[in-house]
Image (cartoon, rainbow, N blue to C red):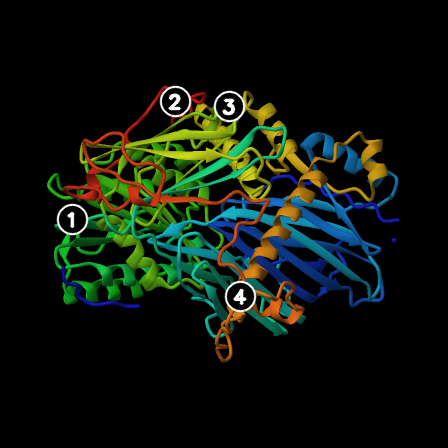
């Protein structure tokens, strides 16, 4: 396939988390404290640091910020902070008189009642409100004249992999009120550690490449560091690492506290051995040019993205470009072959577009469906912020079901203020994918990797059944298609430790494939507590989605509140409450669940830091001149301290407190059942995939059995 071209005081602090409507606003700096209460003024950011650890795709981000009140009066501060998509906020702390205050999650109404009781006593609290699905704000009072205020937030997330690239975005753009300074007065720093069982090939920052120092300590551990004075906090930081798996495989991690049921995360990844079968595809790009796209550079990002995507198309492909606000507008009015002339026309057409009007997507979708050819796959690619009219959303989801045979819908969310839930649901319902672009992304790489997933065959009707371990409550209930470069992840609970067997089945162009592998559920494993909250977060989101489809949430609210309180998850029905000391929590009979969980999390994170430090020191032993080994001296029983320090550390030892990682190749072969043990020699047999990947579409499944672990 030939490519045409490429473009490229008594301080009682109470925090209550509630939900409000999303109001788009100009992008500003993240984690900003501003003086509010109608008096105006801005608090300076004295220090902003982020410590990020990525452990096999699961991220823990600690953000610490110090603000200073530059005025000679007490002020009320408004703290604003964004979190990434699919992230679970684990803790929010602030320091009063040098003491960290840790909060608890409560049912929303009760939290509000406790909050109001402090206000009546004029013991002024802090108020934390969620302003949409990724931003929240917290009011803090009082901050004394010329005083400093320290705050810290911790959140967990799992990274999306895109053609073996995992992208981490540290969101510095949010939507507070206008007039905020986007600079730190002192230190701004971010340190990122990446550890992976799959060999890491590269770590880079598309957004701040010139500012980061990247260090390779080993194939399994990379580090990146950025530090500056007077840092600009008005632009997202994007880091991406490339981890290559040569063969299709499974990775399993567990979390189990003694005396309780365990948790697991199972990841299925398609490997490079997948054969590429390609005879051309049709693409219809739908570009949102409504008024909301005119803000924050969204339209410019979209132009660059489509330009890069078209540059990746081959001579076998055809494409059309449709813009829409309240009405659609076509470029060619037919599918055009990919030539230099048609590409140039597309570029000129894109440059002429301006953002204005409202957003009505359904007519544009209906127009795109008209381009369906029964002999070729049709890929409808939507670039939008998803800010469509509220009244249209149900009709829009219904229209997905009327798409022509062989058509898939792919949604690319543009910018930082984007309706992720809607775009993700559209893609999910249509058997496609959703991706999200930030200002700092590498558009050419994103376009190449996104299209390569379309070229690679996808396994449909993926099911995983676990025998042994007494597995239950698996999430998600329905697994998506398996795309090349985009792993499928499964979370669940288990009651019994010990050996178990996982059976994987799928269909590729109608041909069944099956493989069984052995795995081990740990009796005690404190090393990965983050997957517990991820499991609960997925369950909460599934319950909300199911309730919305049914038209009522009344049947799920109690369970959502229970999960929120138990796992410290803020939802529309739970809030985060921070009190001054333990005596206040006892007075209100509030269990310290989050305090206990936070302690476990921090111990596990410290173990990770120790392991990363060991890998770093091991890499340092390779620096400098090589010292020839001396002949062994059997008579010497006690080594001196210097000699011990010079002995190279054992390669990749397993910490006592952490079971060995389960990461092996697996074999899929059409029509063949049973097979490999969970060991390295089971890999190497390619997925015998025929035809085009478009045939591997999601099949509707029902009668999911939670108790036997089948999804």
> Alpha-carbon distance for marks 1 and 4?
47 Å
Q: Residue furthest front?
A: 635
In the picture of the structure, the residue carrying the numbered disc 2 is 704
302 relative to 335 in the view: left or right: right
Looking at the picture, how far across and down is residue 337, in whole percent? Answer: 13, 57
Q: Quadrant of residue 8?
A: bottom left
Structural crowding at the residue carrying mark 1, measured as other residues with C-alpha within 10 Å and reported as few (<14), some (14–19) or many (≥20): some
CB-based contact (under 8 Å), mark 1 and mark 2: no
Front one among 373 and 227: 227
Structural crowding at the residue carrying mark 3, measured as other residues with C-alpha within 10 Å and reported as few (<14), some (14–19) or many (≥20): few
Q: Secondary structure at mark 4?
A: loop
Q: Nearer the viewer, mark 3 or mark 2?
A: 2
> Alpha-carbon distance for marks 2 and 4?
51 Å
Query: Which mark, by number, is residue 552?
Result: 3
CB-based contact (under 8 Å), mark 4 and mark 3: no
Q: Nearer the viewer, mark 2 or mark 4?
A: 4
Mark 3 or mark 1, which has the lower sequence index?
1
> Alpha-carbon distance for marks 3 and 2?
22 Å
Front one among 88 and 596: 596
Query: Which mark, by number, is residue 277?
Result: 1
Q: Quadrant of residue 242?
A: bottom left
Structural crowding at the residue carrying mark 2, measured as other residues with C-alpha within 10 Å and reported as few (<14), some (14–19) or many (≥20): few
Query: Which mark, by number, is residue 140?
Result: none
Q: Secondary structure at mark 3?
A: loop
Q: Secondary structure at mark 2?
A: loop
| Residue 182 in sight | no
Q: Secondary structure at mark 1?
A: loop
For the point 49% across and 26% down, which residue is it? 473
Mark 3 or mark 2, which has the lower sequence index?
3
Which quarter of the image is occupied by the C terminus? top left
For the point 28% across and 63% down, which residue is it? 307
CB-based contact (under 8 Å), mark 1 and mark 4: no
């Amino acid at each position: 396939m030939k490519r045409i071209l490429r473009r490229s005081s008594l301080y009682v602090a109470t925090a209550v988390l509630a939900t409000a409507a999303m109001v788009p606003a100009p992008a500003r700096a993240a984690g900003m404290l501003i003086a509010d209460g109608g008096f105006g003024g801005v608090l300076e950011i004295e220090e902003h640091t982020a410590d990020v650890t990525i452990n096999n795709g699961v991220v823990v981000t600690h953000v610490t910020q110090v603000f200073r009140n530059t005025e000679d009066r007490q002020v009320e501060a408004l703290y604003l902070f964004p979190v990434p998509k699919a992230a679970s906020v684990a803790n929010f702390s602030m320091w009063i008189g040098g003491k960290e205050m840790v909060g608890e999650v409560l049912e929303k109404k009760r939290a509000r009642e406790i909050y109001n009781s402090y206000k009546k006593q004029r013991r002024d609290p802090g108020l934390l409100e969620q302003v949409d699905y990724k931003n929240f704000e917290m009011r803090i009072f009082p901050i004394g004249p010329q005083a400093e205020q320290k705050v810290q937030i911790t959140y967990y997330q799992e990274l999306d992999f895109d053609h073996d690239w995992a992208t981490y975005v540290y969101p510095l753009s949010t939507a507070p009120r206008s007039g905020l300074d986007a600079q730190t007065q002192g230190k701004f720093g971010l340190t990122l550690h990446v550890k992976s069982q799959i060999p890491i090939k590269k770590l880079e920052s598309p957004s701040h490449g010139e500012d980061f120092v990247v260090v390779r300590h080993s194939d399994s551990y990379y580090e990146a560091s950025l530090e500056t004075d007077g840092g600009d906090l008005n632009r997202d930081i994007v880091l991406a690492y490339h981890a290559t798996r040569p063969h299709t495989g499974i990775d399993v991690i567990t979390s189990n506290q003694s005396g309780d049921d365990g948790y697991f995360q199972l990841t299925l990844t398609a490997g490079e051995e997948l054969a590429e079968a390609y005879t051309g595809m049709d693409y219809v790009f739908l570009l949102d040019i409504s008024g909301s796209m005119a803000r924050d550079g969204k339209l410019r990002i979209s132009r660059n993205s489509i330009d890069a995507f078209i540059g990746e198309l081959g001579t076998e492909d055809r494409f059309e470009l449709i813009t829409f606000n309240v009405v659609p507008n076509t470029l060619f009015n037919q599918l055009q072959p990919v030539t230099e002339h048609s590409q140039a026309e597309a570029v000129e057409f894109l440059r002429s577009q301006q953002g204005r009007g409202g957003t009505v997507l359904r007519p544009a979708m209906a127009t795109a469906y008209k381009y369906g050819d029964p002999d070729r796959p049709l890929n409808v690619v939507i670039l939008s912020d998803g800010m469509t009219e509220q009244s249209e959303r149900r009709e829009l989801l219904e229209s997905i079901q009327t798409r022509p045979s062989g058509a898939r819908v792919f949604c690319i969310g543009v910018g930082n203020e984007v309706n992720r839930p809607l775009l993700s649901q559209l893609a999910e319902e249509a058997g496609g994918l959703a991706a999200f672009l930030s200002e700092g992304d590498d558009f050419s790489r994103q376009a190449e990797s996104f299209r390569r997933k379309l070229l690679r065959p996808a396994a449909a009707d993926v099911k995983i059944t676990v025998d042994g371990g007494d597995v239950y409550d698996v999430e998600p209930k329905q697994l998506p298609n398996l795309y090349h470069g985009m792993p499928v992840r499964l979370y669940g609970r288990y009651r019994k430790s010990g050996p178990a067997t996982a059976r994987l089945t799928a269909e590729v162009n109608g041909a069944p494939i099956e493989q069984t592998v052995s795995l081990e559920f740990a009796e005690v494993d404190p090393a990965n507590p983050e997957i517990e909250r991820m499991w609960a977060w997925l369950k909460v989101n599934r319950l909300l989605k199911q309730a919305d489809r049914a038209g009522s949430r009344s049947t799920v609210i109690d369970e959502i509140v229970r999960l929120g309180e138990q796992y410290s998850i803020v939802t529309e029905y739970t809030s985060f409450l921070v009190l001054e000391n333990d005596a206040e929590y006892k007075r209100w009979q509030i269990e310290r669940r989050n305090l206990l969980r936070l302690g476990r999390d921090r111990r596990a994170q410290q173990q990770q830091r120790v392991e990363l430090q060991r890998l770093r020191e091991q890499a340092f032993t390779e620096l400098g001149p090589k010292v020839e080994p001396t002949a062994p001296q059997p008579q010497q029983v006690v080594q001196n301290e210097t000699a011990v320090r010079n002995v190279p550390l054992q390669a990749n030892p397993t910490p006592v407190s952490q079971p060995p990682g389960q990461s092996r190749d697996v074999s899929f072969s059409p029509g063949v059942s049973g097979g490999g043990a969970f060991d390295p020699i089971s890999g190497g047999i390619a997925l015998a995939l025929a035809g085009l990947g478009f045939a591997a579409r999601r099949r509707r499944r029902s009668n999911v059995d939670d108790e036997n672990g089948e999804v």
